[in-house]
Image (cartoon, rainbow, N blue to C red):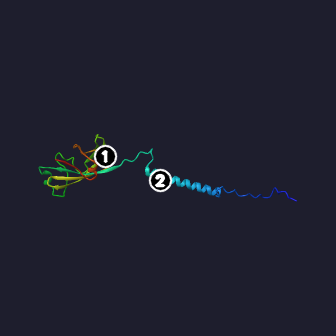
Amino acid sequence: MTTPPDPGAEQQHNPAPPTPSGISKKAAAFITAGVAVVVGGITALVFTLTGDEDTPAETETFTAIGTMTLTDSSGILGAAFTSGSKCMGDRGYDDIAPGAQITIYDNTGTMLAIGRLGDGKVITPGECLFNFEVPDVPAGHDLYQIEVSHRGKIAFTEEDGLLGRVSLSLG
């Protein structure tokens, strides 16, 4: 004789059948989540290394390096200084001094970067040499123009700026 099931008795549940590949649903969910994290990480890395098409590319820049020589052929400038001493312009050249503004333009006259003259140093009687570095000059222009104070623009190339071959003189 068969006994009917007791309605108050706990019924046993069979575990979920395995997926066709033999992996449980829970394990498949973990694997799927792991794959999503790995793919997301690779995608983020690719965008970081190559840039997003909607984000403008950073402009490559360089530092223009050079010298400015102030010459006083009458010897007035060098008479008061010995070689290696600090110096600056005087008597009509007083704008040529440490901290004087240097402006770099492209070949159309658009301002690109600003720098300053460094300290002046007497190199021979009557000659005062200033070093300068102008950072963040946008790269890729055919020609550049440089101006110290208001003394007029002189052309130079990117290669000359990178190699410290921008050499200006006045006097």
Task: Work out which residue is located at the far front of the displayed protein and give it.
Answer: 20
Task: Kindly state the secondary structure of the residue where label 1 is placed.
Answer: strand
| Pointers 1 and 2 in contact (C-beta within 8 Å) | no
Q: Quadrant of the N terminus?
A: bottom right
Query: Which mark is first along the chain, 2 or 1?
Result: 2
Residue corresponding to mark 1: 113
Q: Residue at x 55, y 53 (%)?
A: 36
| Label disc, if present, on residue 41 of the rendered structure | none
Q: Amino acid at mark 2?
A: Leu
Question: Toward which corner of the image does residue 153 lie, by quadrant?
Answer: top left
Above or below 122: residue 147? above
- Between residue 150 and residue 23, name the one nearer to us: 23
- Between residue 61 and residue 95, name the one nearer to us: 61
Numbered-mark total: 2
- Between residue 20 and residue 74, name the one nearer to us: 20
Dot 2: within a 10 Å radius of its alpha carbon, few (fewer than 14), some, or many (20 or more) residues?
A: few
Task: Kindly state the secondary structure of the residue where label 2 is placed.
Answer: helix
- Location of residue 21 in the rendering, given as x and y in whole percent from the top left corner: 64, 56
- Mark 1 and mark 2: span between their CA atoms? 33 Å
Q: Residue at x 62, y 58 (%)?
A: 27
Task: Work out which residue is located at the far bottom of the displayed protein and give it.
Answer: 1
- Location of residue 106 in the rendering, given as x and y in whole percent from the top left corner: 29, 43
Q: Amino acid at mark 1?
A: Ala
Residue 110 falls left or right of residue 75: right
| Label disc, if present, on residue 45 of the rendered structure | 2
Above or below 20: residue 151? above
Task: Work out which residue is located at the far top of the displayed protein and give it.
Answer: 108
- Location of residue 167 in the rendering, given as x and y in whole percent from the top left corner: 22, 50
Residue 104 falls left or right of residue 48: left
Dot 1: within a 10 Å radius of its alpha carbon, few (fewer than 14), some, or many (20 or more) residues?
A: some
- Location of residue 112 in the rendering, given as x and y in whole percent from the top left corner: 31, 44
Q: Residue at x 35, y 49 (%)?
A: 60
